[in-house]
Image (cartoon, coloured by chain):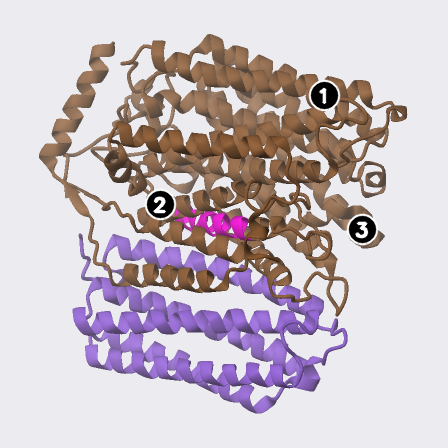
Chain colours: A purple, B brown
Amino acid sequence: MKVDNSLPLEYSTEENNLKILGFWIFIGAEIMLFATLFTAYFTLVNRTGNGPTGAEIFEITPVLIETILLLTSSFTIGLGIHAMRLNKKKATMGFFIVTLILGLAFLGVEIYEFTHYVHVGAGLQVSAFTAALLTTLGTHGLHVTLGLFWGFFILLQIKKRGLTPETANKSFIFSLYWHFLDIIWIFIFSFIYLKGMM
Amino acid sequence: MDFFDRFAVPHPSFLIYASMVGIGLTMLAIVVGITYFKKWGYLWREWITTVDHKRIGIMYLLSALLMLFRGGVDGIMMRYQLSMPENTFLDSQHYNEVFTTHGVVMILFMAMPFIIFFFNYLVPLQIGARDVAFPRLNALSFWLFFMGMGLFNISFIVGGSPDAGWTSYFPLAGNEFSTSVGTNYYMIAIQIAGIGTLMTGINFITTILKMRAPGMTLMKMPMFTWSAFIANVIIVFAFPVLTVLLAMGTMDRLFGTNFFTTDNGGMDMLWANLFWVWGHPEVYILILPAFGLYSEIIPTFARRNLYGYTSMVASMVIISLLSFFVWAHHFFTMGQGPLANSIFSISTMAIAVPTGVKIFNWLFTLWKGKIEFTTPMLYSVLFIPLFTLGGVTGVMLAMSAADYQYHNTMFLVAHFHNVIIPGVVYAMLAGLTFYWPKIFGFMLNERLGKWTAWTLSIGFVLAFIPMYITGLDGQARRMYTYSESTGFSLLNMVSFVGAAIMAIAFVLLVYNIYYSIRYSPRNIGSDPWDARSLEWATHTPVPEYNFAITPQVASTQAFWDSKKNGHELFKGDIEKIHMPNNSGLPFIMSCIFFVFGFAMIFSIWPLAIITLIGILACMTYRSFEKDHGRYISVEEIKETEKRLRGAKNEGR
């Protein structure tokens, strides 16, 4: 394996370069996936049938908490990658742990939010609107959940194997994924919640 | 409902029971055969665990040929049912199932794997690469596709086939009107295969962008690689729409949501719109690589450089962009109003322009060429007029006002078969004949090949041209029978005869393969057609590492230049080559996906949860796995090169 030391660790081998480009293309596909979900959501947003509308069920407090948690976690994963570039293993791991805890907290609040919706009569089967809402939020939540497991595995690998071209590559790609989920959340926050509460 | 009742076929008939017995016996024969010849180990080591793009390609090819016959039998059954008025060969339910599976199988499980076979086999060779960017992912793509295909194909003997058309429009496909598990099969099997295809798209875009031989700029890539690149870009942008669509359809059917229902706010037209947002780009995913193959074959046998390289690329890019802006032309009659219809009408007609550019480019390539009528060339020359006919009827259909007459009639059926068969199927057969010697080391018989091409074309014209007429006279598609007073009998009988002749052509194809395996001369060298691009520059059979030395490229046809204009392809010395290791994980994970899909289809939740955990466990294993590949030593490469070069010289 040829290692080019003039480049950051995550870009240092040819295979690493391929993986990073491949992941960007995957993110392209993910953008289409969420775009389709948003399209479905905005088509169905006013088709509430006998169920409640968005304005009736949305609560600003948990949504704000979720937003702050996820945005902060996006910041800490950025710091993690910065530490990785400075070759500081302990700091990298520390920021990964903070990121994962924030992600977990986000997920906890989101689960509370979902139970709240079911409680106020906005379950999955109630109307086209609730189905689209919970599917869009749920898909994002599922991505976060998978990301938590993935990030945890990478954390273990950094601990065991140190900052090698492979683990650095995985960490960097994970950070791309995490930032992407953050951006999707910003769209959800602005166009589903804020617009829905107006 | 009793637990085991749901696995029964809802509308059993003699044909289905006979198929069950046939499938059972075939499976048994395969298992006994492999065991008897002690081939399990070979199969596992060389094929099931392989990550070699060439072998994965061949497995795609075998799947595609298998599905060509499955879909073909469906087609023949439909034509026979309609050949006489008031025929009772199939009842209405069985007819519904047959046209649904015919569509799905032919598009998703025949045409898609066929083009992916060409992507896999040709793209790395054409760009001078050792393999694709992510070989392991490539194996996973194949096995997911394969398991999706398997799942879809068991539907007609376990629980019943989907019966709501290959478009599966809601509310017809909802629980209310499609009560059997058939449509669950549609939702889940296509989902699994679709995930595989999406990964293929990511893999090939990365491969083409990052792994080209030195000197091969984007505008020096062979035309097939260009078409593969654009098709894969369309895959990456279109398939996520299908993923979401099928997930929503699954939720409507299994979890009682209201996306596409008719009450509680559900909107059935959302399905139709999203389906075609994926579905229309999908047909360009099929046709663009077909165009790419014609662009390889026509210059080879006209002995001329491809005319208008830049305009060929530009027209493909324009087609790929337009393909996302025409979807509503599939339902002009469903009430979007004149403004939307006009816009989609115009964007649809606009596609004829870049396509026309390509047709003229091929004609200009032929102009003043020293044309050699080999079988692949014969297919290409038959393609141009037949496809143009289909294209022109497409422009007729694009006129939204006139479409009220054509919509949902046999006219439409005639149109899309008229573009798909001469467009895609001919390209697949032409490409198969063209690349057969590269893949298997011997030529297919030319005489039998030409017979096949002509038989297929005569059968095609007889089968589909009459449908234009009956369609204009008002024969609706997807109707299982008609009365004699309609006057459709004669033309439908002609159609059936044509379909039977097409069946004969496919039998000829199989016979040709058998005949050529037995009698075709071996040792034909690595470049039997005197072709032009890099895939012919390596040995036949292609060694595992493709090229011992990475080729240097300076033009769009590097190999031709190395033969005729003294271009030096292989500079430098042999170095050790890094190759990926085989892995059983893609196969195992896809098998678990199969069981997961089955459990979802039949709502067996505990099994679904267990298998889902299994899938996640496979991904976890992969995350922790250390796999740095292996090296092929210089000595080994030199030995292989010597052996292969020896074989070639012997033949001269």
Task: Please give the chain letter of the residue carrying mark 1.
Answer: B
Q: Are labels 1 and 2 on one chain?
A: yes
Image disc number at residue A148:
none
Tell me the residue at 37%/74% (across/down): A148
Q: Where does the N terminus of chain B fall, quadrant-wise?
A: bottom right
* Lower sequence index among marks 1 and 3: 3
In the picture, measured across the screen, residue A31 lies left or right of residue A173, that is right
Tell me the residue at 87%/24% (across/down): B484
Q: Amino acid at mark 3?
A: Met
* Lower sequence index among marks 2 and 3: 2
In magenta, the rendered stretch is B188-205
Which numbered disc, 1 or 2, marks the residue closer to the eye?
1
Is residue A53 among the parts visible in the rendering? yes
- Whole-percent x and y of residue B575? 14, 39
Q: Where does the C terminus of chain B fall, quadrant-wise?
A: top left
Is A31 situated above or below B454?
Answer: below
Q: Are marks 2 and 3 in contact (CB under 8 Å)?
A: no
Image disc number at residue B139:
2
